[in-house]
Structure formats: C-alpha cells, structure tokens
Image (cartoon, helix red, strand yellow):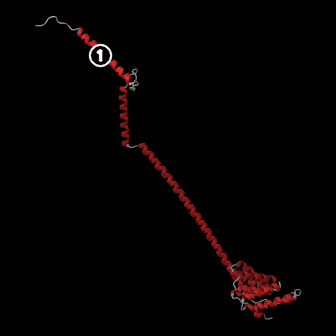
Amino acid sequence: MRISLYKIFFGLLFLQGGAFAVVAQEQEPEADAKDLKTSVDLTYEANNELEEDFVAAEATYRKAIAKSEKNAVARYNLGNAYYKENSMGEAFMRYKEAGETAMTKPEKHKAFHNMGNVFMKNEEYQKAVEAYKEALRNDPTDEETRYNLALAKEKLKKEQQQNQQNQDDQNQDNQDNKDNQQNQDQQNQDQQQKDEQQQDQEGGEQDDEQDKGDPNKDGDQKEEQEKEGQGDKEQKQKKPEEGEGEPQQPRKSQLSPQQIKNILEAMNNEEKKVQEKINGKKVKGAQVKTEKDW
C-alpha cells in the first residue's frame, strides 16, 4: 500500500497527518467487500486530488464516507484537508468521526491528537488537554502528543491566571466603585447637615434681629403711639357728657321742593308777624309830646 503518498503534514503543533492504513477489509470480514473496496478506492483517489484540487478531493472523500460507514481513513484524511483550509469546525467533526470509527489504537491516537490541535487553534485549552490525554492513552510513546499536552497545560495555566487576575481586577473595581459611592453619599450627607445647620443659624439670627428691632423704627412707633394717645385724650375731652347723646349726622332732606318752598314762606310770614309785634310795642310805649319845645 502506498501510504506514504497520502500523508498530509500541517506544521502547527505537530499535526498527525499520516493517512490511516486502509485495512478495513482485514478487520471487517463481515462487511460488504464490494462496498468497502469501492470506498477505499475513492479514498486513494481523493488523496491524489487533494494535492491539486481541494474541492474535487472533498467531494471524493464524501463519496468514500457515504459508501462505507466503517472507513475511518476517509474521515481522518478529510479532517486533515479541512484543517489545512482552516475550517476548524469541519475538521473537528471529521476527526471525531474517525476516532469513533477507528478499529486500532494507532488510528484512535492520531484522531484524538489532531482533535487536540483543533482545540489549541481555537484557544480551548482545557478541551485540548483532555484530547491529548486521550491520544496518549492509545499511544503513550508519542513524544509529539506529550509535547503538545505540556504546551496545552501551560496555556491553560496562563489562561486561568489571567482569568483570576481579571476577576480580581473586576472585584477591585467593584469595591472601588462601592467605596467611592459610599464616600460620595457621606459627603452628600455631611453637606446636607451643614446646610441644615446653616439654615437653622440664619433663622435664629433673623429671630434675634426681629426681637431687637430697628431703634429708629421703635422711636417712630413710640412717637406714633404717643400721638394716638394724645388724640384719644382730646377726643375724650370733646366727647359730650353722658345723657346728651352723640351728635347726629345731618340727614338728607326727604321733602319735595314745593314743600320746602311752602315752609320757607310760612317761616317768612311768621318772622314778619313777630317783627310787626316788636315794632308795635315800640310805638305804643313812646311818650307823645303835646307841646312844642321852644
């Protein structure tokens, strides 16, 4: 078998690129010999196409896989092809299928080794460690897998330290924010108390100022009170004695103009009569001279 012609080497992390040996016919005597032979032939064809045309090789690998479920070689080599194209998701799926399908420990070792490489590429270091460990269980002598395992552990340790540092920084930031908030709250509370004290002090000063009063204003008020007292005294002196009654305000006339005219005429006539009586008494009382004075 021309296995060396179908090896695929990818430089990153010692990719296990050797194609699986096509020995399915010997390990699976009960499998349909015709379908298995066809699947193996298609795998060889895809290996040759891969050097020139990835698309054609991918299609041929898929035909080989579809032809026989037990052909781990086609799955593993297709996984290597995807890895070379940086299609890590597809590569992992094919490596996983190869590991589940493989009948020998060397084949399982290669599948899990390259699964570990995919995890390293994706910076999933914990999963890479587990994959490399599984690969070493199937081949403890492989130094490349052991090296990759040590590298994955170192990367995982640094990642955990970085995560812890980030968590510590986050906790410190949260604590700082909490302290700053508490300080701000305390400052606000102190300022509020200070403002309240200042308001109370200003209110007390205003009360004292009102109690003291303005001297000029007090003098004016005193003088005004004295004037009011003097006025009350004078008013009291002018007040009529008890029994005389309060002076009445003049009322508006409720008589008609004609009535007023009649009253005035009556008053004039009465006044004339009185005047005539007075004049008559004066005439009657005077002495009449009978003789002339010479």
Tell which of 33 and 111 is nearer to you. 33
Indicate the quadrant containing the C terminus: top left, top right, bottom left or bottom right. Answer: top left
Residue 213's image quarter? top left
Residue 32 can be seen, yes or no: yes
Q: Residue at x 25, y 13 (%)?
A: 279
Q: Residue at x 23, y 10 (%)?
A: 283
Residue 247 can be seen, yes or no: no
Tell which of 106 and 294 is nearer to you. 294
Looking at this view, name the residue that lies furthest to the front.
258
Looking at this view, name the residue that lies furthest to the right.
30
Residue 287, image x, y percentages: 20, 7
Residue 148, image x, y percentages: 71, 84
The image shows residue 213, relative to residue 184, as above or below, that is: above
Residue 9, image x, y percentages: 72, 90
Question: Which residue type carries mark 1?
Answer: Lys
Looking at this view, name the residue that lies furthest to the left.
294
The image shows residue 89, relative to residue 38, as above or below, that is: above
In the picture, measured across the screen, residue 274 lies left or right of residue 180, that is: left
Residue 120's image quarter? bottom right
Residue 15's image quarter? bottom right
Q: Secondary structure at mark 1?
A: helix
The image shows residue 259, relative to residue 170, as above or below, that is: above
Indicate the quadrant containing the N terminus: top left, top right, bottom left or bottom right. Answer: bottom right
Tell which of 24 and 161 is nearer to you. 24
Residue 198, image x, y percentages: 48, 52
In the picture, measured across the screen, residue 163 lies left or right of residue 286, that is: right
> Number of marks in the image?
1
Residue topped by disc 1: 272
Q: Residue at x 35, y 22 (%)?
A: 261
- Crowdedness near tag 1: few (<14), some (14–19) or many (≥20) residues, C-alpha within 10 Å: few
